[in-house]
């Protein structure tokens, strides 16, 4: 059975710097890790291609500086790409590279099709607005103008991520890190996006809270069949969540396959080192 | 009177620049046009935006009225009037109907304005999204993309906290179905007066260096959620203790001896006009 991918990424490139005569050509360039030693240009993502299928969780692992987060930022339009194509399997957007769309259209996709959970809740939440206001912000952006329906949605989601309702009008800056992360998840879910990006969601949380958040993510996948891209440097998180996994090194995808396959039988030298360094 | 300065204080180049900015502002209702705010003989934040607009507009035939939160005789209004009069020698008036230019701080007069009049409002914070987004670079983009969730979010927060939209003043408005605009800190009571107003409304922010406008007969809608409709301040059951009017914006005052609260018209010239009209004429009545 062939399924259509819901998100289709081809040759995504992101560089910081202009590049020089020594690094213009992809095949010729001699990079030191991911930057050109002559002009200092950083090639954060190099020809990253991926397919995300409905209802699956795609894991992306790699050491820090390997381009995982940069790729997520590009996909979520937080940062402009240098080149590349992304297609969404959606009736109104078929055949259109969404990187070429206008800012308004991109914002529309962000508000209606995507959800994002950042590693640092400061990026995803307005810390001096109430938690329920933060959730409403995304609903307002998606065109909702009805207070009671937004309040009901917000409360339902907060309950779902186990934030006590009597704190729903409190600002997230008063919350613990784990609670902030859960408010962020609630916000990302507020308009039932078909695609969710999770960037190092459990990093910096203690183990029991981590388990809570991971349970929640798994449950969301099962309940609503939302497709997710999960970025993490923590192999345990990837093992628990991801159906398929990609390994990134110095801005490029070096290995991909079923998670079990990658973790049990790594082919690339770097992946082998990564897997065996697991404590 | 002998002029020792230019007519209307400014050199002609400055007037030209401000008028050109004003024309652009009128052409794009609600859009904040940047301009080179001049150093004025009053401090920024004390009405320099409005004053610069007035000085660029005024001609020898004009009649000027300046009000400060409804009052014609407050220090700030008087100082601005004096400055304009000493540099132009135009006529001053307290009567809303008699003025061709009305500069105002935080109120729109109660009397209906006409097509021949221009209302100049002084603006402290022209950016309705400033509370949600500190960066000017970012707010400009939000306006360009008509992305106003921030302004709605502020109202949502009020409803969550106080159970209603509680903007004391400066309740944001949608102008001509395109730009969300800060109407300057007028009470919500005055917002409906902006809608389809016969007079041209100009708004000037001297410190923030912005001019924007609502042309005559332009659609102006106050932001409101479906289930929390826009409402103005209510003075139900109260009337002005001097002239007895009920349907105007009233100030709440406290009698210091008895401790009783009483109400009075905020628009002083409206109140005086009402009183004069009720007074039987003793001799041939004459308006100063």
Image: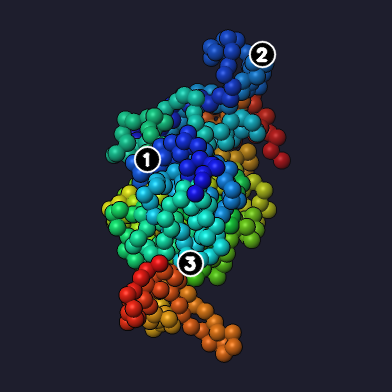
Q: Residue at x 46, y 50 (%)?
A: B89
Q: Residue at x 57, y 53 (%)?
A: B45
Q: CA distance from mark 3 to mark 2?
A: 70 Å
User: Is label 1 on the same chain as label 2?
Assistant: no
Marks 3 and 1 in Cβ contact (< 8 Å): no
Report the residue marked by disc 3.
B71
Tell which tag, 3 or 1, sits nearer the viewer: 3
Mark 2 belongs to which subunit? A
- Mark found first going from the N terminus, 3 or 1: 1
| Position of residue B251 measured from the top left corner of the image (x, y, whole percent) | 48, 75
Q: Which residue is mark 1?
A: B23
Q: Are marks 3 and 2 in contact (CB under 8 Å)?
A: no
| Label 2: element kind | loop
**Are the residues flagged by discs 3 and 2 from a single subunit?**
no
The numbered dot on residue A183 is: none
Instruction: Tell which of A100 and B15 is nearer to you.
Output: B15
Tell which of A179 and A149 is nearer to you.
A149
Chain containing the residue with disc 3: B
**What chain letter is assigned to the residue under label 1?**
B
A230 and A31: which one is in front? A31
The colour style of the image is rainbow
The answer to whether residue B5 is seen in the rendering is: yes
Residue A38's disc is 2
Where is residue A15, by image quadrant?
top right
Task: Check disc 1 and report its element: helix, strand or loop.
Answer: helix
Q: Residue at x 47, y 24 (%)?
A: A83
């Amino acid at each position: 059975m062939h399924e259509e991918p819901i998100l289709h990424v081809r040759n995504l490139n992101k560089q910081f710097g202009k590049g020089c005569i020594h690094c213009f050509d992809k095949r010729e360039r001699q990079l030191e890790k991911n930057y050109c030693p002559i002009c200092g240009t950083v090639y954060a993502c190099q020809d990253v291609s991926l397919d995300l299928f409905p209802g699956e969780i795609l894991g992306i692992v790699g050491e820090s500086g390997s381009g995982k987060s940069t790729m997520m930022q590009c996909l979520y339009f937080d940062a402009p790409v240098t080149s590349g194509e992304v297609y969404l399997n959606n009736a109104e957007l078929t055949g259109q590279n969404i990187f070429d769309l206008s800012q308004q259209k991109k914002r529309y996709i962000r508000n209606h099709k995507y959800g994002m959970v950042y590693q640092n809740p400061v990026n995803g939440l307005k810390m001096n607005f109430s938690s329920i206001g933060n959730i409403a912000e995304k609903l307002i952006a998606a065109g909702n103008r009805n207070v009671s329906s937004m309040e009901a949605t917000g409360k339902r989601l907060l309950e779902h991520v186990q934030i006590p309702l009597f704190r729903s009008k409190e600002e997230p800056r008063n919350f613990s890190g784990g609670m902030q992360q859960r408010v962020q998840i609630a916000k990302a879910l507020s308009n039932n996006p078909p695609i969710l990006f999770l960037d190092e969601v459990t990093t910096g949380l203690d183990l029991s809270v981590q388990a809570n958040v991971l349970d929640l993510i798994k449950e969301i996948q099962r309940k609503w069949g939302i497709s997710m891209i999960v970025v993490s440097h923590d192999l345990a998180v990837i093992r628990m969540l991801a159906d398929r996994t990609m390994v990134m090194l110095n801005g490029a995808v070096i290995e991909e396959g079923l998670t079990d396959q990658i973790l049990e039988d790594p082919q690339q030298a770097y992946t082998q080192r990564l897997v065996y360094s697991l404590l | 009177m002998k002029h020792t300065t230019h007519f209307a204080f400014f050199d002609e180049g400055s007037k030209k620049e401000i008028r050109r900015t004003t024309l652009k502002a009128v052409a794009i209702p609600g859009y904040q046009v940047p301009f080179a705010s001049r150093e004025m003989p009053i401090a920024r934040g004390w009405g320099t935006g409005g004053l610069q607009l007035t000085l660029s507009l005024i001609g020898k035939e004009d009649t000027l009225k300046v009000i400060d939160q409804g009052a014609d005789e407050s220090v700030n209004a008087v100082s601005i009037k004096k400055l304009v009069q000493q540099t132009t020698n135009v006529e001053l008036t307290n009567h809303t109907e008699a003025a061709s230019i009305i500069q105002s701080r935080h109120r729109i007069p109660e009397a209906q304005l006409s097509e021949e009049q221009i209302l100049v409002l002084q603006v402290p914070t022209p950016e309705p999204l400033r509370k949600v987004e500190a960066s000017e670079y970012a707010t400009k983009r939000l306006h360009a993309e008509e992305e106003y969730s921030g302004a709605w979010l502020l109202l949502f927060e009020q409803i969550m906290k106080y159970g209603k939209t509680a903007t004391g003043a400066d309740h944001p408005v949608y102008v001509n179905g395109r730009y969300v605009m800060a109407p300057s800190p007028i009470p919500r009571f005055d917002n409906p007066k902006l809608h389809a107003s016969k007079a041209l409304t100009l708004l000037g922010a001297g410190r923030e260096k912005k001019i924007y406008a609502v042309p005559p007969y332009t659609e102006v809608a106050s932001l409101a959620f479906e289930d929390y409709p826009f409402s103005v301040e209510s003075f139900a059951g109260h009337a002005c203790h001097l002239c007895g009017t009920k349907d105007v914006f009233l100030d709440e005052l406290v009698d210091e001896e008895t401790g009783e609260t009483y109400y009075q018209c905020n628009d002083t010239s409206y109140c005086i006009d009402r009183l004069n009209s009720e007074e039987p004429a003793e001799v041939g009545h004459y308006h100063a």
